[in-house]
């Protein structure tokens, strides 16, 4: 059931919704639900890739809704930089770049230093 719901929300985010929908319509419930499912129920590599891509795509239009989730999301994304699949690593780099202005505004030891350490260790 949860897997089907996640597929539905990914489909909506990628196909039916304008990616700025959540900002212009104030529809943060869908965003929060998607983030919860993505972080806690990442079922397959394909869903992981799609989820990371969607998180990057919605960064600009939904930044206000994303900010409360970034303290949990950024460490997860940093861990994805070490994924064995190059596509996941590449998408994760792009997604992290979309939130970079938030990352550098936080205490550097909290997010920036672990991010740079992981980037250096993976050879990017």
Image (cartoon, rainbow, N blue to C red):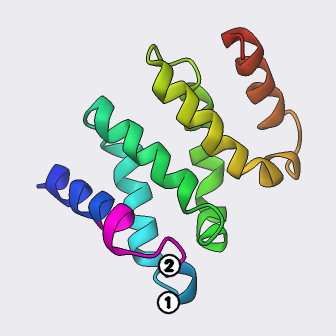
Contact (CB < 8 A) between labels 2 and 1?
yes
Residue furthest toward the bottom? 25
State the image coordinates of residue 118 (x, y, percent, origin top left).
Answer: 70, 19
Residue furthest toward the left? 1
User: Which portion, as a residue range, is magenta?
Assistant: 12-20
99 or 76, nearer to the observer: 99
Note whether 43 is above or below 36 in the view shown: above
Q: CA distance from mark 2 to mark 1?
A: 5 Å
Residue 106 can be seen in this image: yes
21 or 40, nearer to the observer: 21
Q: Give me the disc on residue 25.
A: 1
Residue bearing mark 2: 22
Give the structural element (helix, strand or loop) at label 1.
loop
Give the structural element (helix, strand or loop) at label 2.
helix
Note whether 113 is above or below 15 in the view shown: above
Q: Residue at x 66, y 73 (%)?
A: 64
Q: Give me the disc on residue 72.
A: none
State the image coordinates of residue 27 (x, y, percent, origin top left).
Answer: 46, 83
Q: Residue at x 38, y 60 (%)?
A: 34
Q: Residue at x 57, y 35 (%)?
A: 92
Left or right, 108 with respect to 78, comes to: right
């Amino acid at each position: 059931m949860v897997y089907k719901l996640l597929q539905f929300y990914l489909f909506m985010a990628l196909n039916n919704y304008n990616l700025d929908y959540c900002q212009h319509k104030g529809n943060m419930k869908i965003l929060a639900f998607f983030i919860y499912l993505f972080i806690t129920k990442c079922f397959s590599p394909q869903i992981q890739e799609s989820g990371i891509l969607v998180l990057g795509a919605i960064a600009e239009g939904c930044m206000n809704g994303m900010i409360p989730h970034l303290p949990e999301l950024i460490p997860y994304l940093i861990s994805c930089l070490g994924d064995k699949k190059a596509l996941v690593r590449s998408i994760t780099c792009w997604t992290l770049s979309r939130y970079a202005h938030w990352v550098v505004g936080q205490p550097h030891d909290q997010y920036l230093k672990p991010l740079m350490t992981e980037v250096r260790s993976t050879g990017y």
